[in-house]
Amino acid sequence: MKPTESAAPSSWLRRRRGVVPGRNGRNEARSATQVWRGRAGAADRTERRRFFDRPDGGRRTGDRTGFLPALPYIVVGMAAVLLGAGFYVAVSGGGGLFPAGTTGWSLAVLTGIIVGHLVALGRDRWWGGTGSGGALTLAVLLLYGWLPAALVSLSVVVLVAVARRHRWRQGVLHGAIDILGVGAGALILALCGTSPTVESPWRPETWDLYAVPELVLAAALYLAVTRALLWGVHTPRAGATPALTRSALVRQGLVGGALLGIAPLICVVAVALPVLLPLFAVPLVALDSTLWMARARAEEQLRDPLTGLPNRQWLLERIWSALDDAERLGVRSALVLIDLDRFRSVNDTLGHLAGDRLLLQIAERLRLALPRGAEVARLGGDEFAVLLPVADSTTSAQRVARALVGDLGSPLDLDGLTLVLEASAGLAVFPEHALDAEGLLRRADVAMYQAKRDRTGVEVYESKRDSNTPDRLGLLGDLRRALDAGDVELHYQPKVRFDGQVAGLEALVRWVHPERGKVPPDEFIAIAESSGLMPHLTEYVLETALAQVARWRAQGLFVPVAVNVSPRDVHTPGFAGAVAARLARHGVPAGALQLEITEHVLLEDPQRAADTLAGLTGHGVKMSLDDFGTGYSSLVHLRRLPVSELKIDRSFVARLAVDTEDAEIVRCTVDLAHSLGLVVVAEGVEDDETWERLRDLGCDAVQGWLVAAAMPPDEATAWLLARGSRGWQRPGAAADTVPHTPSGHQVP
């Protein structure tokens, strides 16, 4: 079945649900430590640091300029103007730039300790993880005014950035942001009538209750301006996930409390006993450590411990953010769910440590293959997800999915061993397939398992193939009740040879719903296959068909009946014995029953399928391979399986008379089957021309509307009795003009 797009729901109202905790796969942190000790460890740790040191998570390079691309230049320009004006006023007025004496040196020493601590910390300051520099800056602002505070802040930020190589541009930007924040705090003090300078500090002994609101407002505005500007210049346009936002807000609350608690104490000591100022390094370092621990815990909740990629929880929150943006902009978003095929065999053969190293390579390959703006996460085990926040169309998203699957199919080197892994991907698109994050993830998962089952590589979600929609779940319950009540019917369609003799009948299940009317077989059979109802349906069909065969045999009609069975039936232990017991209970010989399987039964476990089919043929049951040519079976498997009949799918038969390629395929299939000793039956024969072509190509029997449509038991009985020993003849055909067809006319 080709992927199609389902209709979009009529309502755009979406309800947020709780985030589902990430599940653990088989390859997790247990062996990650061992992996990182190997040659892949250093590169992986470097990538994880690169990944989580920036607020955009797993985004492919590109969208890293924030809400306004020009904002960094505006910030630096404004800070330069403000700092230049401050220098000019201070120098022209004969004022000092920084306190002298013991106080100045003590503040310089404390600043140096903080710089050394931040350099040793080895992290980016902007993400809100440190408070030591902010506390010292605010203290100098309250005591000596905005210019000395700006110098302290600029010294801390720029020196830390310079010490960390290749970060001087970022240091200048962060210093400029701190200068604007200091200026905002000084503005609050000025509005309240306080303008401290180096010559006239705002000494703590002059503070009273009226000073408390000034302190709080100055600290709050300094924190708000600096963090808002930092967020604006660093956060991507799509925004951070809610969990990261909440974590950052909590940390900023801690920073604010620390500033209010420590900055006034620094002021008191700077005036009373400045030589003790370097001792404040201890609580300031402790503050930074507390904040970094909070950040590490927040990141750990959103990070896969093995690959360093975001996990399921991060993905769900990021999808919510992307869907909000897509709804606001009126665009599509898409989610691609990727699962590695047969990855379990790598673990079983090479061990879990090798599997972990392979997952690291897969994660890196996915990250490098992402289109611009896309984001990747690991859901657990060998499952990955790629979010496309903006997708032009379902077709373009499908192209991206196929490109990713193709990249994963390239050879991988694992300790000198070349491995080729295949992947299956499912695609779900907002708003066509789902309107919320959980729904988009679930439907991409449904499509992915469809791709894995059909070996198609990539599948787009189709609601008609999803058995878990409310409508289909209701239909599943109705089907179960119909089976229990015996309301499901079997119709029988004849198969005839070219001499007109009836070769058998195929039992086809039919269901008339009391409210919906006739339900297409493809629809309710797909529901049964994707649920636990398929064995029950197969038992019902076998029981009904064998009871009808017994009645026909009692009437002297000795025709075999074919019953379709699913791959799940063939892989069920004891299936062959259960069929034999059912035959014995009805008194029907095994040769009167034929079981039709599809090529899909060969894909999952060919050996088990061969064992079950061998058991069935050992009891005397004949086997037929249905819909041949539409699957992906191996000719080696076809040769080894104990089938006696091969049915050519109707898709090749329908255009046989007008399409030379289809005719050649049918001819080759007939020759192949005959070389293996198989009987060939063509499905979907609807006209005389197709009949003639099939006969000329050497086909053994046909089935289709030209002969008869599927009929209820009573009509099928009348049809068989009317033909008797003379068999079936095409309408208008004469015995002397068609040598292989007996005389007579078809009886309605």
Image (tube, rainbow, N blue to C red):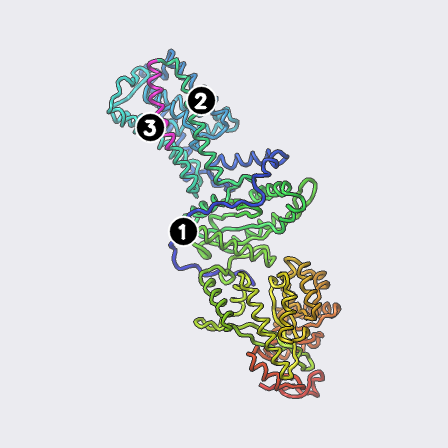
Q: Earlier in the sequence, mark 1 or mark 2?
A: 2
Helix, strand, or loop for circle 3? Answer: helix
Residue picked out by circle 1? 327
Tell me where residue 21 appears, x and y as whole percent. Answer: 47, 45
Q: In the figure, is residue 359 to the left or right of 665? A: left
Magenta stretch: give its range.
253-272
Tell me where residue 191 appears, x and y as whole percent. Answer: 26, 27
Q: Earlier in the sequence, mark 3 or mark 1?
A: 3
The magenta stretch spans residue 556 = no
Query: What residue type is disc 2 on?
Result: Ile
Helix, strand, or loop for circle 1? Answer: helix
Label 3 and label 2: CA atoms lie apart by 20 Å
Residue picked out by circle 2? 114
Residue lying furthest front = 585
Residue 463 visible in the displayed image = yes
Query: What residue type is disc 3 on?
Result: Ala
Residue picked out by circle 3? 219
